[in-house]
Image: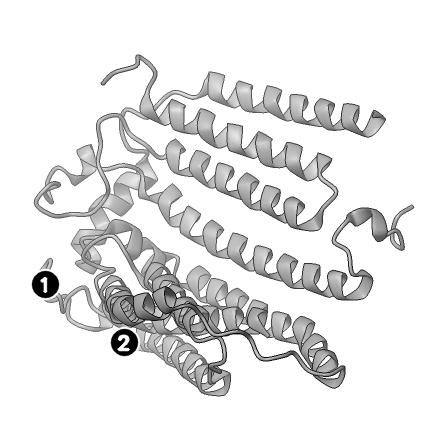
Amino acid sequence: MTTGIPVSTILMITGFGLTLTGLWGMLTHRNIMRIIISFVLMGTGFNIVMVASGYVTGATAPIIDTALGLGEAGARAIDPVPSALVVTAIVIGFSVTAVMLAFAIRLYAAKKTLSIDAFTESKW
Amino acid sequence: MIKRAFAVLAVALMALVFLGVIGDYVELQALRPLARHYVTEVPAQLGAPNVVTGILISWRGFDTLGEVAVLFMVAASIGLLLKKDSAGGAAAGGRDARPPAGEIVTTGAMVLLPLIFTFGAYVIVNGHLSAGGGFQGGAIVASGVMLMLVASPSATLNTALLGVIESAAGVLYVCLGVLGLVLASGFLDPRFLPKGQFGAFISAGAIPLISALLGVKVGAELSVIIDRFRS
């Protein structure tokens, strides 16, 4: 099936759409859990954009096997650098999310609510 | 209402930036020089068919080590953040015993757990040959641990043992890195072991070893993080 739009452009639009959804959710929701979910959505969107930016027209995954011979690797493989970077980004995103969730648990224990309207101490 | 307007403005401005990026984006027709270098040099120099694993474990190996250190710090900081909580809960009457998991969950876990752990081990040790590697396999193993904890809520995870395993894997990882420094051309250079036959299970120098240590370390760290959230 061909749509006329390159597949990586579609992926990029999807990724940026997810990012905008996440940003909108972070700015408008008052519940800390929802803010965290929005943050994860935003990170996922950026990861998709990064992976999409490494796509080469008509190329395949950079794994040398029967589908991609040693000789044609330079011509028919996608850019492996964004993929390698995204692995890092996913791990760091996971770490940040875990710490945020731990803070959410602590905040809930302190005020028995997850609404950020209840936490006004550091608001100016 | 004014806050909502600012949110709309911020999202609209970001959308403008992103539209500019998409508008200027042209799909690559050929590899960039750096990518071409990696795609040709990873199989040639390291003997690893999976280029991404080759990059992650050798050229970006130091970075991967730092990443694992970040995971370790997260496990430690979550322990610190949630520790007082559970102690206070225990003092205030203690958390009552969790209800046991349902029949379907326990039976499903019995069937699925060996499969999940085997698959995780497969993904970890096959990282240099096909899609996979230490991080991915470690995450699969940790998901199995999570299923185990869901299926038997009263079970306790031996976090002390997991901590020892994780530290040992980390120390061995650094030792392999130093071996690379001494025997080959740099820190975490996997070429101090023979390259072996291209595409064979035991090949690509020290990459499978480093990948396995990475998998053990990530699996143990994620399991500890999951267990910390449970208490």
Q: Element at badge 2?
A: helix
| Quarter that holds the N terminus of chain B | top right
Q: Give the amino acid at mark 1.
A: Ala
Q: CA distance from mark 1 to mark 2?
A: 23 Å
- Which amino acid is tagged 2? Leu
What x and y, as percent, mark residue A87? Answer: 41, 51
Query: Which residue is the extreme one toward the right?
Result: A124
Residue B26, quarter of the rendered image: top left
Q: Is residue B62 above or below residue B152?
A: above
Q: Position of residue B124 (x, y in %)?
A: 28, 65
Chain that bears disc 1: B
- The residue indicated by pointer 2 is B183
One can see residue B141 in this view: no
Above or below, comparing residue A47 to residue B163 in the picture: above
- Residue A89: x and y, percent? 48, 50
Element at badge 1? loop
User: Residue at the spot x=39%, y=57% of the render?
Assistant: B60
Give the residue at mark 1: B200
